[in-house]
Structures are given as structure tokens and as C-alpha cells.
Amino acid sequence: MHWVFEPGFFSSEPVHVALVIGGIAAVVSAVVGVFTVLRGQSFAGHALTDVSTAGGSGALLVGISPLLGFVGFGLLGAGAMDAIGVQRVRGRDLATGIVLGAATGLAALFLFLDTTSGATTGATQQILFGSIFTLDPSEIPIVVVFSIVAVGMIAALYRPLLLASTDTDLAAARGVPVRLVALGFMAALAVAVGLSALAIGAILSTALLIGPAATALRLTNRIGAALVAAVVIGVGVTWLGVLLSYDSYYWVSDQNAVPVSSLIVGLVFVAYLLSGLPAIRRLTGRRTVMVVTEAEEARLRGQRVSSRAAVRSDGDSPRSRRVL
């Protein structure tokens, strides 16, 4: 196995930390990412990565863990987007654009201050592109707590969130507190973005959030199966990226390893491309990307019944009855 695992891989503490934190971030990102894709809020997830950039760089500036800055600013950004108008598609784009612009300006300021102060060497690399092999083991408990919070929120909101993600009007008609559900989801999204930013960097975290989820939804139209597939893909590409980055240190004589974040993003892209191959789609029996829930199916059945009733009321002509 030495040709797969280079010497010291299993005994290296930085590798252990990278595998644990990367795996946890991949699980949370995959679970939240499936609903992000269903709700059409990939752009909102991207905006929160820029917000988390500002938070992480600001945290380094004051000498605290970047993770706290990632998640803290992400929650503030999520709340701002909801307050501006995240519940409607047009409102989502408006809110996302406003928050994105403000966050980018703050990120630029904080990164400038980080790079001009001697106490934060390598801040730009760590915040934007990640440095998973340099993470301290003390980060693991914080990561675990945030991951439990994010996944717990998705689990608690699962049924109303699923209905609101597929048909907001139907969810509101059935008494679902759509605005509250949206706010709860945005909070979980902010945490997921913060965790993925810690693993592979803020600027690339969208890949871990959206890529495995989009790949899974290409393979199956069942939500449960999509969640499992997204988790497997996310953890798989993250751990494989860690392995390849570690091994790449021995590939060339100058012993410069390939960045983990670049490898993970590349593997996510390859997985998404492979999921579109005809052979893969035939194997999974996937023919359409539409996800139809039981509630959506009932709504469609109700529309068909209403259409039949309307045709009957048009008259008793044989032609109208033949249409039925």
C-alpha cells in the first residue's frame, strides 16, 4: 500500500486533524447543500462565502479563531439577507447583491490590514484558500458543536423546509411559517459556509457546498437518497484530496505539495461531470432533475381534478366529454 499512502500518512497528526475537520465540514455542507440547490439559493451561498471572508480576516486581525469570524459574520449576513427580502426570488437577488457588495468591501479592508501587520503572516492564503494541514486540534470541538447545530436545524425543519423549498405558496397555504423556515435555513447555510471555508478556504467553499449536492441530485430524485449520496461524495472527495495533497509532497524533487483546496475542488468538478455521463445516468435510473414531493404530487392531482371540473362546466357537448 506504500504506493497509495506515502510514509507517515497514518501517523501524522496534521493529517488526522485534516481528515476529521474536512470530513465534518463535508457532511454539513452536503446536507445543507441539497436544500440550497432545491431552493435555488446557490448565489446566496456564494454571497455568504464573501461575508465569511470578511469575518475570517477580521477574526485574524483581532487574534481569535477564523472559524468564529466565518460563522459569526455569516450569521449576520444571513440575517441581513432575510431582512432585505430573501423570501422571494427578486428579493433574494437584491438582498444577495447588497450583502455581497458590502462584504467584499469589508473583506478587502480586513485582508489589507492583515497583510500589513506582522502578527498575521499568511493571512490571505489561510482565509481565501484554506490551510487545512495547519489547523490546530483545539478547533475540532468547536467544529463539532457548529456541525451539530447546523444539521440539527435542518433535521428540525426538515418537512416544512422541504415543502417550502419546492412550493412556497403551497407551504404558506398549509400554514407553514415560511419566513421563519427561511431564516432558520439561512442560519444553517451560514454555519455550513463557515465550516467549508475553514476546510478549503472562503473563496472555494461554494464548491464543497454546491458541488456534491448538485451531483447527487443529478443521480437521484429522492431526497433521502440525494442526502446520502451528497454526503458520500463530499466526504470522499475531501478525504481523497487530503491524501493526494499529502502524497504530492513526494511526487517531485522540490517537495512542494499541491494545495488540498485545489485538489478537492478539482475532484468535485470531475464528480459532477461524471454524473452526467449516459452510462452513469442509466445505472442510477435518473432521467429527470425534477424533485417531486408528496405535497407537490397532491397539488398537481388537485389541479387535474379542477381542470376536469372546469371542462364539465363548459357544457354537456360530446366534444367536451371526449376531452375528459
Image (cartoon, grey):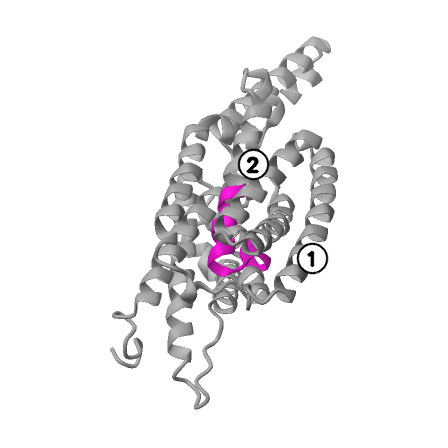
Is 322 situated above or below 139?
above
Q: Position of residue 160 (x, y in %)?
A: 49, 25
Q: Position of residue 250 (x, y in %)?
A: 38, 84
**Relative to 271, 313 lies left or right:** right
**Relative to 35, 225 lies left or right:** left
Q: Position of residue 128 (x, y in %)?
A: 58, 61
Name the residue at 65% across, 18% down: 307
The answer to whether residue 197 is magenta is yes
Mark closer to the observer (2, 1) = 1
- Label 2: state its secondary structure: helix
Q: Residues within 10 Å of mark 1 (few under 14, many from 20)?
A: some
Q: Which residues are magenta?
A: 190-206
**Relative to 263, 137 lies left or right:** left
Q: Amino acid at mark 1?
A: Ala
Residue underneath mark 2: 186
Magenta stretch secondary structure, dominant: helix
- Label 1: state its secondary structure: helix
Q: Amino acid at mark 2?
A: Met
Q: Position of residue 136 (x, y in %)?
A: 38, 59
Name the residue at 24% across, 77% down: 1
Distance of label 2 from label 1 (alpha carbons): 24 Å
Name the residue at 66% across, 22% down: 323
Residue underneath mark 1: 108
